[in-house]
Amino acid sequence: MYGLILGLILGGCASIKPVVDTTPEHTKAGDKYPAAKYIQSSWSSLPHWGDDDMNQAWSTWQKSCKILLKSSDELGFQQVCEKAKNISGPDARQVRAYFESNFQVWELRQASVVNQFPIGSPMGLMTGYFEPVLKGALKKSERYGYPLYAMPKSWQKDPTALRPPTNELISKGLLTGNEIAWVEDPVSAAFMQIQGSGKITLENATVVRLGFAGTNNQPFKSFAQYLINRGELTLNQANMQNIQAWAKKNPSEVNTMLSANPRFVFFKVVTSSNSQEEGPMGSLGVPLTEQRSIAVDWQAIPKGAPVFLATNDPGNNKELNRLVFAQDTGKAIVGGVRADYFWGTGDVAGQQAGKMKKNVRMWVLLPTNKN
């Protein structure tokens, strides 16, 4: 899954003094996942570990296990997923005991300077993303005049080839005939590209889910930064809600703003077995779970792994401490202590995701490989 709210915002955070590592490092994880430093920790180091809703976490972990049981395994995930099969009708105490008995806690620290966080820092950046739901149509009309595109069939034979940037694709009509759906405004279409998936509600109440199908392989450039450079918004104002408000006040300048990003995202109609009630499909190959799935750098964290987060809720700034799972990735998610938090589907989730730019600490749970 490609698009992430960070694509709108430059992640600038205050520098934190480097931490001197005095505890053992996990050598195998360090070799295989060099974008992060793994420092041995303990369950007692996890803020409010005993307060998390383990029943909700358990169903999300089972999704990860469906993939991990079929994958090559050097860290022991297959063994702990096999043990999970023996737990039926779990309660919160049983689930917590399962994790504590079968996993070792490893704190993540930065292996390089990322988002101004220095090497060795336990702090990193947390952003958010969501699945948009837009009103739209499958044919162009006076109301629905802005298209979302499928990748041209001739391009699908070589999806890694560099294609023309956004402004050329649109101005030269290179995508004409590949429209997959139409929505009400170009900014909504651009935000769906940034998220990489979404739902279109048709006028007959039918819902069409669109999934990520590729890009033109151009580099991403933030149109939020374009507005900042022009003095239209400050860095603190550069969130989804304020960009939409600016676009409504400046309709004649919207296309210029959107063309500042040469990267273009293509979609496909998703007809997989997962229901409309489930989240969109993540890069791991399982439906994402609201507030339990995260996108991470897979050079830093194993696919599907349990991760404990300590950050703050963007709505009320209260502590947000919970067990989540690395079930997605994205071009903008780079570095060891770095995650994008999946808030869910629809406008409420979008409001939370659009405001999410917080410091975070992260602990990865790796199997202890006990027999």
Image (tube, rainbow, N blue to C red):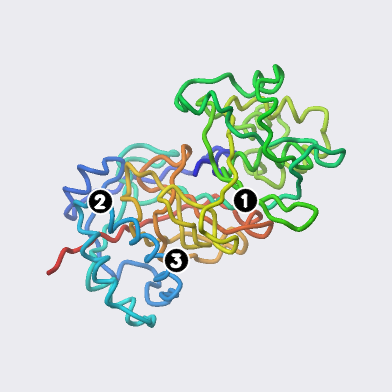
Q: Which residue is outermost to the right?
A: 142
Q: Amino acid at mark 1?
A: Arg
**Residue 233: x, y in percent?**
70, 36
Instruction: Tell me the residue at 66%/55% (across/down).
Output: 351
Residue 237, position as x, y percentages in the image: 67, 43
Q: Earlier in the sequence, mark 2 or mark 3?
A: 2
How far, Cα to Cα, is label 3 from label 1? 31 Å
| Labels 3, 1: front one | 1
Indicate the secondary structure of the residue bearing disc 1. strand
Question: Mark 2 highlights which residue?
Answer: 38
User: Which secondary structure, mark 3?
Assistant: strand
Left or right: 169 as drawn, with respect to 327: right
The answer to which of 319 and 291 lies nearer the viewer is 291
Q: Which mark is residue 186?
A: none
Disc sitting over residue 321 in the figure: 3
Q: Tell which residue pokes out farthest to the left in this image.
A: 371
Query: Closer to the N terminus: mark 2 or mark 1?
Result: 2
Q: Earlier in the sequence, mark 3 or mark 1?
A: 1
Q: Give the numbered dot on residue 209.
A: 1
The kind of secondary structure element at disc 2 is strand
In three-dimensional space, the C-alpha distance between marks 2 and 3, rounded to whole angstroms, equals 20 Å
Q: What is the number of callouts on the image?
A: 3
Q: Amino acid at mark 2?
A: Tyr
- Find residue 246 and report its horizontal and vertical position in percent: 77, 38
